[in-house]
Amino acid sequence: MADKKSFFGNIKSFFEELGDLSRFAGRFFREAVTPPFEFRELLKQSYYMGNKSFFLVAVTGFILGVVFTLQTRPTLEEFGAEAYIPSMISISIVREIGPVIIALICAGRIGSSIGAELGSMKVTEQIDAMEVSGTNPFKFLVVTRIAATHFDDSFIGDTR
C-alpha cells in the first residue's frame, strides 16, 4: 500500500512541477512581448553572458581539438591519411561536437552566474526594493537573462 501512495505521490508531484513550469513559461512569453522593453539590460546581459563566455568556449574547443588529434592520429597514420587530420578535426568540432560543448559550458557558467546573482539579490532584498519602486522584477531580471542567454548561445554556437 505504501508503494501505491509513493507512486501516486510522485505522479502528483510531477504534474505539479509541470504546471509550475507551464505557468512560468506563459508568464515569460507574456512579459517578453509587452512593453516596456528592457533593451539596455538585455544588451548588458548579452555582453556578460556571451562575451565573457567566449574565452572559455575557445579554450575548450582548443583542448578538444588536441584530444581528437591525439586520438585519431595513430589510426590515420596506419592508412597514410595524415593529411586529412586538420580537416577532419575542424569539421568534427565545428559541426558535430562544438555546439553541444558550447551549450554545456555556457549552461554551467551562465546558469551558476545567474543563480548566484539572483540569490544574492533576494537575500539582500533588492528584488523587494524593485517591486516597491514600481519596476517589474520578473521582466527586468528573468526575461532579459533568458533572452540574452538564447541570443548569445545562438550566435556563439552557430555552425552554418
Image (tube, rainbow, N blue to C red):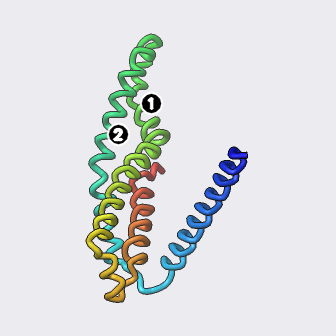
> Looking at the picture, does residue 88 appear above or below residue 43?
above
Mark 2 nearby-residue class (10 Å; few <14, some 14–19, many ≥20): some
Type of amino acid under label 2:
Gly
The picture places residue 15, in percent across and down from the top left corner, at 65, 60
Q: Residues within 10 Å of mark 1 (few under 14, many from 20)?
A: few
**Is mark 2 in CB contact (under 8 Å) with mark 1?**
no
Which residue bears the numbered disc 1? 88
Identify the residue at the far front of this view.
1
Q: Position of residue 86 (x, y in %)?
A: 38, 30
How many marks can you see?
2
Q: Position of residue 5 (x, y in %)?
A: 69, 51
Nearer to the camera, 16 or 38: 16
Q: Earlier in the sequence, mark 2 or mark 1?
A: 2
Which residue corresponds to the image point at 40% horizontal and 14% vertical from the top-left?
74
Q: Quadrant of residue 78?
A: top left
Question: Is the residue 108 above or below the residue 12 in the image?
Answer: above
Name the amino acid, label 1. Met
Residue ID for mark 2: 61
